[in-house]
Image: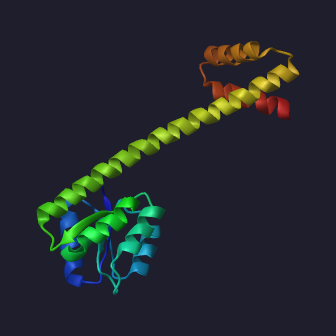
Amino acid sequence: MERGLIISDSPKAMKFFEEFLEDFGLTSIHLAATPSDGLRALLDDDPEVVIINGPIRGESGASLAEEIAAANRCQVILFVKAEYMEDMTSRVEKSGVICVSKPISKNMFWGALSFAEAAQNRIAMANRTIQKLQKKLEEMRLVSKAKSILMQEKQMTEPEAHHYIEKTAMDRRVPRGQIAEEIIDFYQD
């Protein structure tokens, strides 16, 4: 993780969190004293982790944490007073928010950040897999459309059209999707 956002209306807590995130290795840390400033900062920096020091502006911070977690791919850590920990955890964990009790121990904070980083890495891996699958699905859609065009325009059977696309792609050493796009473009003009 490189980018972080701290939302806290306590200057002392903000300084603590900022120093800790720097020690953890984050190189870009934005600070926000209000929830609205925090939401604006999300748009500007796209942080990988958001630290919310609850309560903030008289609110627990749970709604803000849930809103951020639902709308962004970043990890959200909500710090709450010990007496509210159980209630807050049961409320925000469904949204994927990590809840940590105050007062804060450095070991607990380090563990929460390590957990958030691991979760962020898993999300990144899942996103790469999704992109590969979307690309494969798009190629399959193009090939299917090109086969349909070949069957209609060249009176090929489905296996013949499939073989034609496969062989042409192999002979030219290009992806099947590229051959399919060329067929589609040629016959749709």
Depth check: give the residue in front, 182 or 139.
Answer: 139
With 49 as the anchor, is 150 left or right in this view? right
Q: Where is residue 121 in the image (x, y as percent from the top left)?
A: 33, 47
Count of numbered marks: 0
Q: Where is residue 112 in the image (x, y as percent from the top left)?
A: 22, 59
| Residue at image point 18% right, 67% down | 20
Depth check: give the residue in front, 21 or 137.
Answer: 137
Q: In which quarter of the image is residue 15?
A: bottom left
Colour theme? rainbow
| Residue at image point 42% right, 43% down | 126
Depth check: give the residue in front, 159 or 63.
Answer: 63
With 136 as the anchor, is 32 left or right in this view? left
With 127 as the anchor, is 106 left or right in this view? left
One can see residue 60 in this view: yes
- For the view shown, which residue lies furthest in the bottom direction? 58
With 62 as the anchor, is 165 left or right in this view? right
Q: Where is residue 188 in the image (x, y as percent from the top left)?
A: 84, 34
Name the quadrant of the C terminus.
top right
| Residue at image point 40% right, 79% down | 35
Name the quadrant of the N terminus.
bottom left
Q: In which quarter of the image is residue 76?
A: bottom left
| Residue at image point 22% right, 65% down | 21
The answer to whether 26 is drawn above or below residue 120 in the figure is below
The answer to whether 116 is drawn above or below residue 29 in the figure is above
